[in-house]
Amino acid sequence: MKVWVKIHLHEQVNVIAICDENILGNIYEEDIKILNVAKEFYKGELKEIKEVINLIQNKDFSSVNIVGNKVIEELLSRKIIKNFKVIASIKYAHIYNVKE
């Protein structure tokens, strides 16, 4: 399984954006909630899920934004995330790495 991964590097904050390959560029709406899988934010490199898991496990990030049913299910099964939210049948989650 491949997913889109983009790393946003800032002075003291690194954000990893991950989404399923097939939902890049889509916008999902439900009531007043909007989930925008913007190419500008998520389109970086197309990577195998194993590479993404290694990237997350290295913990060299401030936060990870994850969107897509396939990637969320994979991360749940590996116990990397414990919960998620849903907008218009699309699962999403965030991981925060708080450094002291």
Image: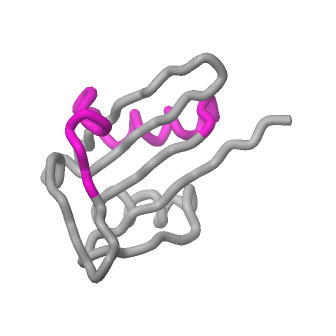
Q: What residue appears at the point 47 percent right and 42 percent down from the top-left corner?
A: 53
Give the image location of residue 30, x and y in percent. Answer: 26, 79
Looking at the image, residue 13 sits to the left or right of residue 26; the answer is right
Task: Name the foreground residue: 34 vs 96.
Answer: 34
Q: Which residues are magenta?
A: 36-62
Task: Give the number of callouts.
Answer: 0
Q: What residue appears at the point 23 percent right and 44 percent down from the top-left corner?
A: 38
Which residue of the protein is positioned furthest toward the front in this rendering? 32
* 60 magenta-colored: yes
Q: Is residue 72 above or below residue 29?
A: above
Task: Name the foreground residue: 73 vs 38.
Answer: 38
Work out which quarter of the rendered image holds the C terminus and state it.
top right
Which residue of the protein is positioned furthest toward the right in this rendering? 100
Task: Name the foreground residue: 53 vs 43.
Answer: 43
Q: What residue appears at the point 44 percent right and 26 percent down from the top-left corner?
A: 8
Q: Is residue 28 above or below residue 32?
A: above
Looking at the image, residue 78 sits to the left or right of residue 50; the answer is right
Give the image location of residue 27, x and y in percent. Answer: 18, 59
Color scheme of the displayed model:
one colour
Looking at the image, residue 100 sits to the left or right of residue 24; the answer is right
Give the image location of residue 92, x and y in percent. Answer: 39, 63
Q: Which quarter of the picture shows residue 51?
A: top left
* 19 magenta-colored: no
